[in-house]
Amino acid sequence: HHDWSGYDFALCGGPQLIHDGRVFVDAQQEGFRDRHMLSRNPRIGIGFTKGRQLVIAVTRSRVYLSKFARAMRDLGVWNAINLDGGSSIGLYYKGNLVIKPGRVMTNVMLVYNDRKQFEKVKDRLTPAVH
């Protein structure tokens, strides 16, 4: 049992792409069976370098998970997971829509430069109740 009370946010994804600097993709072993995920698709993944630098990698090209994992490793990523792909990919960076999602998004991940910036807006990030 893990105490999650000290966290503001937790992210679930998969399959794992990189573990301790080595490409490690075994989607079926992790329980992923969706043919679309296992085939060539646009990808988005998140990971950390050995120095704990956050890396979010996105490609619109249709690639297999293993190729995407190798590209992330080549960027210096030490540990990484796949987030989603296909029409779920969207990227908004520094006020610009870089990649428009192909469908309406129900979940988003926000990354702020510093904790103070996040604290100012976090109460407004909760979905509205209808």
Image: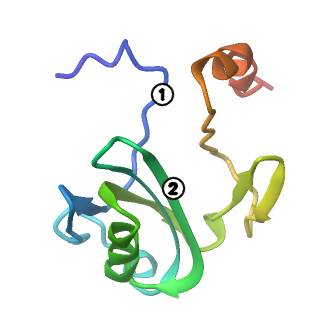
Q: Secondary structure at mark 1?
A: loop
According to the picture, the residue beneath numbered tag 2 turns out to be 56
> Can you say which quadrant of the picture contains the N terminus?
top left
Amino acid identity at mark 1: Phe
Please indicate whether residue 22 sits to the left or right of residue 43 in the image. left
The spot of residue 101 in percent (x, y) is 73, 64
Q: Quadrant of residue 39?
A: bottom left
Q: Nearer the viewer, residue 100 or 48?
A: 48
Instruction: Kindly identify the residue that appears in the image at 49 percent across and 20 percent down.
Output: 8
Q: Position of residue 9 (x, y in %)?
A: 48, 28
User: Up-down: is 4 above or below 99?
Assistant: above
Outermost front residue: 51
- Counting from the top left corner in percent of width and height, residue 112 is at 63, 33
Contact (Cβ within 8 Å) of mark 2 with mark 1: no
- Density class for disc 1 (Cα within 10 Å; few <14, some 14-19, many ≥20) is few
Give the residue at x 37% y 80%.
Answer: 38
Q: What is the quadrant of residue 108 in the picture?
A: top right
Number of labels in the image equals 2
Badge 2 marks a residue whose secondary structure is strand
Q: In which image quadrant can residue 59 be found?
A: bottom right
Q: Earlier in the sequence, mark 2 or mark 1?
A: 1
* Labels 2, 1: front one: 2
> In the rendered structure, which amino acid carries the disc numbered 2?
Ile
Left/right placement of residue 23 relative to residue 38 reads left
Label of residue 112 in the image: none
Place of residue 84 in the rendered image (x, y in percent of width and height, measured from the top left)? 50, 63
Find residue 9 and name its label.
1
